[in-house]
Image: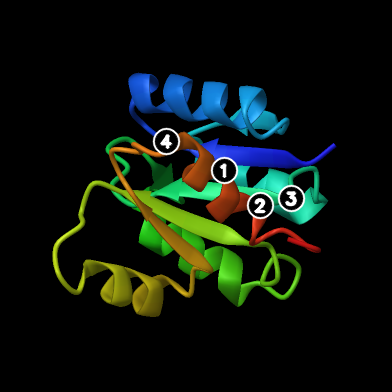
Amino acid sequence: MTTVLIVEDDPINLRVFSKILTKRGGLEVQSTEDVEEVMRAAQSREIDIILMDVSLAHSVYQGKSVDGIKITQMLKQDPKTADLPIILVTAHAMEGDRENFLKQSGADGYISKPVVDHQEFVSQILQHLPGG
């Protein structure tokens, strides 16, 4: 079964995304805000794709505060995790944000919040999976 790791600091968004992905997408869902857990899950390949919130309020890695852009950069620079699809999810949806965030982070996709079209949300995730 395909497993999505949701890295999200808002419990409501997390619940909504989890429900959409399991009910509509038939996907397995894990979630964490803990950067060490994200790295471990990515390196061990127990997940197939990551949904990464850009603005993480509480995430710390090696004593430094990090956001979703930084975590994505770290994963994309590691040869063991570079090919793992990462989709940024953010409420920052101003003109140019998409291009800037994708360029800065090296992420594979970008979805803006709030997620209104649930089927489109699932489709955007599925298209980044092998054979998608």
Q: Which of the two residues, 106 or 115, is positioned nearer the viewer here?
A: 115
What residue does disc 4 label? Answer: 8
Amino acid bearing label 4:
Glu
Separation of disc 1 and disc 3 at Cα?
A: 14 Å
Distance between the alpha carbons at the discs numbered 2 and 1 = 6 Å
Residue at horizontal 74%, vertical 50%? 48
Residue positioned 74% across, 45% down in the render: 47
Q: Are marks 3 and 4 in contact (CB under 8 Å)?
A: no
Which of the two labelled residues, at mark 1 and mark 3, occupies the earlier sequence position? 3
Residue underneath mark 2: 126
Local crowd size for mark 2, using a 10 Å CA cut-off: few (<14), some (14–19), many (≥20): some
Of the two numbered discs 4 and 2 in the rendering, the one whose residue sits closer to the viewer: 2
Residue 127 appears in the rendering: yes
Number of residues whose C-alpha sits closer than 10 Å to that of mark 3, classed few (under 14), some (14–19) or many (20 or more): some
| Colour scheme employed for the rendering of this structure | rainbow
Mark 4: which secondary structure?
A: loop
- Amino acid type at mark 3: Asp
Which badge, 4 or 2, comes first in the chain's sequence? Answer: 4
Indicate which disc residue 122 carries: 1
Label 2: element kind: helix
Q: Quadrant of the C terminus?
A: bottom right
From this viewpoint, which residue is outermost toward the bottom? Answer: 103
- Tell me which amino acid carries mark 1: Val
Instruction: Residue 96: give x, y in percent of width and height.
Output: 19, 74
Which circle marks residue 48 in the picture? Answer: 3
- Asked if labels 1 and 2 touch by Cβ distance under 8 angstroms, the answer is yes
